[in-house]
Amino acid sequence: MIGNLIFRPLLCIATLLMASCGTQTPDDNGTDKPSGTPAVEITLGTITETTVEATLNFTNGEVCYWAVLPAGESVASGYALKKVGKAINASGSIIAEGLTRGKSYTLYAAAARGDEYGKVVSAEFTTQKIVTTLPAKGWQTTADKRKLFEAITIADESAAPASSRVITLNDAVTYQTIDGWGPAITGSTCYNLLLMDQRDRTNLLREVFDPVEGMNYSFIRISIGCSDFSLEEYTCCDTPGIENWQFPELDERDLLPILREIYAINPNVKIVAAPWTCPKWMKLAVNSNAPHDKWTSGRLNPAYYEDYATYFVKWIKYMESKGFPIYAVSPQNEPLNHGNSASLYMPWDHQRDFVGKHLGPAFEQNGIETQIWAYDHNFDVPDYVKNIYKSTSAKYFDGSAWHAYGGNKSVLGDIHKAAPEKGIYFTEQSIGTWCPNFGDNLMWTMREICIGTVNLHCKAVLFWNFLLDANRGPNRPNGGCTTCYGFVDFVDGGHKTLNRRSHYYSIAHMSKVAQPDALRIGSSIDQSTGGVSFTAFLNPDGTHSIVVLNEGKAQRFIVEDGKGGSFSFEAAERSVSSIIW
C-alpha cells in the first residue's frame, strides 16, 4: 500500500465506477439490516502531485477496505484487500498521501459484511506533474569527434518521449566537497608552452584556466625537482648537505613563469606537488645499506629523514614566497615504482615513519598548513594506505592519492569506509600510443575516473600531462615514458597547431560545471543504468550541475531536480554531456 491514508466525511464527487445496491430487511430484533451483496462505488476527487482524494460510497456492508497500489499491481479479492489496505466504517472521503509525481496508480475498494466480501472495484489515476523547465545550458563531446565540447539544445520535459530515462537529483543527500580538476604542469609542459608565441600561449591558458570564459581548470600537479617529463634529472639539493638547498635553475626559468601566467588568469588554482626522487646523496640501495648514487631506484636513508623533511619545508616556503601556496604534497610519486628515470622506493612503513616522525612534525613546527597525501600510486595496493591509517602517523595524513595503471577503482570505497574523515584524490593517468583511440579513451576515462572515482568519494581528478610536442616529449630515457600523449600536443613539429586529446575534454566536462567547493549530491535513475554513468553537484553559487556518460545508442534523458524543475536533452551515441543550471 502507498502513502498515508486519511478518512473524511462523505463528499459528492462525479462517479467513475459503481456496483449495484441492495435492500434492507429487519433482523431478529426488528432492526433493519442490509440485504444483498456488499457493494461500493468509487468517486475520484482532487488529484495533486503527491495525493489523491476519493469518495467511497458503500451499501449492504459494515466496512469498506481500500488501498492505492502502483499501476500494474492488483488485488484478487476483498479478503486480500483487507490484508493490505485500510478500512472505513461509513461511506465517506479518503485521501492517500506520499505518492510520486507523474506516476500511475490504481485505487481498489471492496465492501464487506462479516465474512462476506463484495466485488473489488477500482479506479485508475495518474498524479499530476507540474513542471518548471530549468534554465540549463550544456555541452557535449562524442567519441567520433563530431561534437567536441559543443553546446547542446536543452528542451522542456514535454519534448521527451515516454521511453526517456529519468535522472532525479536530491540535494538533501550530500557527499564530498570537490577541490578541483586539472592537469600536471610538468617541466616538459612548461618548456613547450614557452616555445609558443605569447598570444597563442595566453589564449591556450585562458581557454582552460579562465573560470568564466574558459573551462575553469582549477587544480594542477607539479613535481618537486625533476620528473620523467623534465629536460634533465635534478633535485633542489644536488650538492651533499641540506645547507646547500637551492631552488632548481630549470624550474626558476620555466616553471615559475608559467605558474605566474596561470595565476594571472585564475589566482585560485590549487597546487599539489610530489618528488620523483630525493637527492642521490640521501639514497641507499633497496636491499642493502650501500650508497645508491643513481637517479633510478634506491631508498631514502633513515639517517637523512630529518634533512629530507627540511627539504620539503624549504621548497614549500620558497614557493609561497613566490606567490604560489602549496595545497598538498605526497611524500613520493609512485613509491612502489622504482624503475622510472627518476624514482625512489618508499614502502608504506618507510612513508609512515618519514611522515610520522619527521615531515608531519616539521610542518607543525614551521606553521605549514599544506596537506599530506599518502601513497600516490595505483589502485592495486590499497593496503599501503590502510596500514598507514592504522598507525599513529595517520594524524599527519589528510588523505590519499591514487593512479589507475593497475587495480580497480572499487578499492576507494573501502578506503572511504576505513577513514571517512580523510580525503581521496586521483592524481595521475596518462594516455598514449598504447591506447590511441580518442573515443575509447574518452569513454573509459569518464566512466572509470571522472565519474567513477568521484562517485566513490574522490575530491579531485588530475591527469598527466598538459602539453607535449609532436614526438611526445621532451621526455627522459631510461625508464621515463616515451609513449605518453598530453592533454594537448603540438602538430607536425611546430608550436602553433594543436591537437586536443581526450584528457583535455574529460577534465573540461567536469571543471566547466562542477566548481571548486561544490558538493556531490544524490542522484538516481528510473531504469537500469547499463551503459549510463552520471554524477551531480550543488555548486557554491547555488547552481546545480550533472555530467552524464552515454556509452550506448543515442537516447533522450529527462533530468529532474526533485523540486518540480526539469529539462530534457539528447545524448548522442557514445557521448559525454555536462549541464549546469
Image (cartoon, helix red, strand yellow):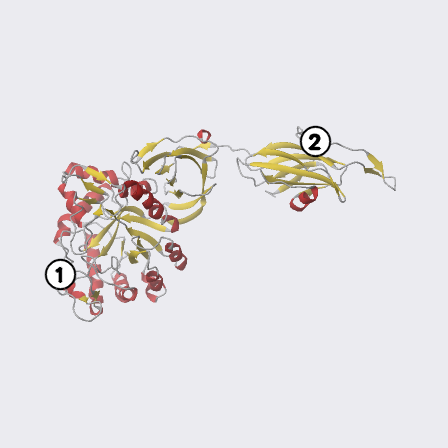
Name the one closer to the observer, 202 or 436. 436
76 left or right of 518 in image = right
Q: Given the current orientation, which residue lies at the most extreme top position?
A: 14
Give the amino acid at mark 2: Met
The picture quadrant where one finds residue 202 is top left
Residue 256 appears at what percent x and percent y? Answer: 17, 48
The answer to whether any part of residue 516 appears in the image is: no
Label 1: state its secondary structure.
Answer: loop
| Quarter of the image with the C terminus in it | top left
Q: CA distance from mark 1 to mark 2?
A: 94 Å
- Report how many numbered discs are placed on residues in the image: 2
Residue 250 appears at what percent x and percent y? Answer: 13, 52
The picture quadrant where one finds residue 53 is top right
- State the mark number for residue 18: 2
**Picture layout, residue 124 above or below residue 437:** above
Residue 539 appears at what percent x and percent y? Answer: 37, 42
